Amino acid sequence: MEQIKAFIEKAKVDKELMTKLDALGKKGADAEEVIALAGEYGFTVTKEDVEAARRQNCPHQVELSEEDLAAISGGATQNRYDAKVCHSLTEARYECVGFLERCWCDHYRRTETGKDNNYYYNEHNCAMGCFKYKTQKHRNLGAPY
C-alpha cells in the first residue's frame, strides 16, 4: 500500500503523470493498466493495492489556518474547473475527485455529515456553484463517495 500512496503523491506534483492517470481514469481503466503505468515510474503496485486504495476512506480536504496558508510556498493544484462542462453537472464525476478519488479538484468538497453502524452520510459541493447534493453509502462498500 505504501507504493501506491507514493505513486499518488508523485502524480500530484508531476503534470505528465497526472495527465496519464486522468486519461486512464476517464476511460475506466482496469487495475492492470494502473499497475503498468506505476511500473513505468518505478513503483511496484499490486492489484490488491489498487483495489484497497479505491475502497479506502481517507480525508482529502484539510482545513488550514491563516498561518498554515502563509507558510505554504509552491505546491500542486488540481483546478479542473471548465465552465463549458462543469455547469452542466448535477453531481461529482471523475474530474472532481481524480485518480482513485485522491486528487480532488480545488473546487470540490465532500463533507461527512454523519455515520452510523451501516452508512456514511456526506454532502458534495462544488465551490463554483455547479452542484450540491447529499448521499448515503453503505459502510461495507468502501469510501463514502
Image (tube, helix red, strand yellow):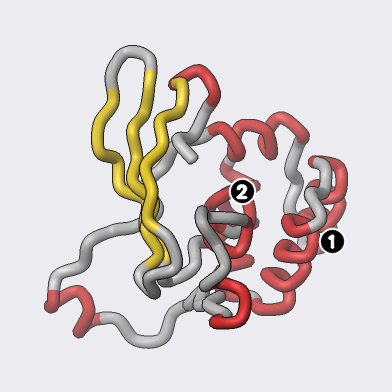
Mark 1: which amino acid? Glu
Q: Is residue 10 visible?
A: no
Q: Kindly identify the amino acid type of the residue bearing the numbered disc 2.
A: Leu
> Where 143 falls versus 66 (above or below)?
above
Q: Is residue 143 left or right of residue 84?
A: left
Residue 100 shows which numbered tag? 2
Quarter of the image holding residue 144?
top left
Return the disc, 1 or 2, that comes first in the chain's sequence.
Answer: 1
Q: Quadrant location of the N terminus?
A: top right
Q: How far apart are labels 1 and 2 at the CA level?
A: 18 Å
Q: Secondary structure at mark 2?
A: helix
Residue at image coords 74%, 43%: 45
Picture coordinates of residue 47, whole percent (x, y): 77, 34
Q: Residue at x 54, y 23 (%)?
A: 141
Q: Decide: few, some or many residues near mark 1? Use Cα within 10 Å; few <14, some 14-19, many ≥20.
A: few
Measured as percent of width and height from the top left, residue 9 is found at: 55, 61
5 sits to left or right of 65: right
Q: Quadrant of residue 46?
A: top right
Name the mark nearer the viewer: 1 or 2.
2
- Per the image, the residue denoted by label 1 is 40
In the picture, residue 12 is in which quadrant?
A: bottom right
